[in-house]
Amino acid sequence: FLPSSYQLKLSVTNLFTRTVFILLVYVSYFIILVQIPESMSYRLELALLLTSAFALILYLPLIERLARYMRTKFLSEYLTEDAESYRQAIKRFNFDALIKNVFPDMVKITGSQSGTMAVLTQNGTFAFHSYFRGRQKKLSPTKDILVKASFQSFLLANRNGASVANTFSNENINNDFMELHANYIYPFIFREKLFGFIAVSNIPNSEASHSLSLLAGQSALTIHNHNLSYHISENKKYQKEAEYAVRVQNLLETGTIPNILGWEITPFKRTNRNLIEFFQVEDGSWFFVILNAGKSYQHIGIILSYILGVVYSQSRLKLLKGFSDIKTLIQSTFQKLDWKENYEMIIGKIGYSELYIIQEGKQFKIIRNSEEVVASMGWKNMISMDKGPIIIQQRGEPVLKFNFKELEVQ
């Protein structure tokens, strides 16, 4: 019946910050009251008004900063209720952070004493990590628990988590729960694929389940990118066949053109060194990126697919706001891959009846009416669509065509 350590720390933190705020307000009120002459009319009312002003303008922001600091220090930056701190934590959410920090936090928020996390490895098996009363370790490969196909199907069907009570009618699944010493399991799912799961000894409440859903989604993305990075490094060493590059490319690229009111977007035949991705940013605006690696290495499709996969995942997490964020993310990802060759790109934003485009590189050309060039390199170009459709070309070959038709008012 006692609260979990996480819930207890959260309650103590809230109680402490609110108590400090109340004390500050009371002390300020009596100090201000002493400074006001007793002969002054409406002395109490004036003291109350000045105290309220101090509390709203000065004390409240300070208390919010104190609460943010304490939650990050004593709880977890991945579980803080502050949106800005959570955003910064998500940006640093990598595979190592998942194992060392996020996994213990996920166990703690459920109020469990112990937990087990399964992570999909590069060869398609699952590696297991355990946590028990503050201690965690990776289980020996000889102790790896076999994740049967039927159990994986069960987790995919219960993407919002399942308790042991859901397994009583299925003896095999119930045995899987028993083998993991679990009363509750939450899967890590991305694009309808199981990338792992966390099994804990306690069934969480609705608030903890919501936190688990946020962290589980990011965990699946992190494992996906970690495994993809491994395949990229292996291909950089051994030059995997172009066929494998195309398969990974088709897996990562959405390949779908969004339906945007008034817009007609036509894609043309693509190559493995020329990739396109459409996505929405934090304010809901539609952006697109066209990447070209310049040279046609056999493994180039994997590298470009990985970069666009990173851009797509960051956009789904609402971490991208505009041209600057997208360009910086692409450049930093190329640097992490130690890419030494030249690359070119177009970043575009789709407005109501205009396109905003930044062009990097000489191979791309944005034209109208087969000859009119409508964009310059290095600048943010605003292209009005009232003079007809435009075509984006790469070395004279069409890549994308944009056409806009004004909607008729009924």
Image (cartoon, helix red, strand yellow):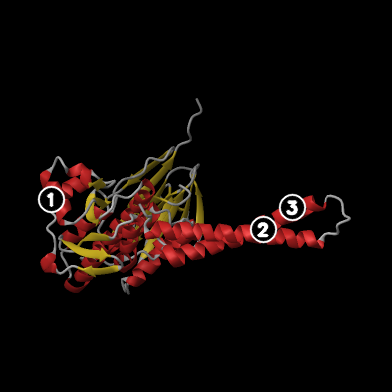
Instruction: Give the secondary structure at mark 2.
Output: helix
- Relative to 39, say whether 388 is above or below: above
Residue furthest to the right in view is 39
* Res 227 label: none
Q: Nearer the viewer, residue 236 or 126?
A: 126
Q: Earlier in the sequence, mark 3 or mark 1?
A: 3
| Displayed quadrant of residue 260 | top left
Neighbour tally class for label 1: few under 14, some 14-19, many 20 plus, Cα within 10 Å: some
Q: Which residue is mark 3?
A: 48
Estimate the x, y position of residue 265 in percent, counting from the top left.
37, 44
- Relative to 314, say whether 171 is above or below: above
Q: Which residue is mark 2?
A: 25
Give the Cα separation between the discs numbered 2 and 3.
10 Å
Amino acid at pointer 3: Leu
Neighbour tally class for label 2: few under 14, some 14-19, many 20 plus, Cα within 10 Å: some
Q: Nearer the viewer, residue 361 or 206?
A: 206
Instruction: Give the secondary structure at mark 1.
Output: helix
Residue drawn at x 24%, y 51% is: 185
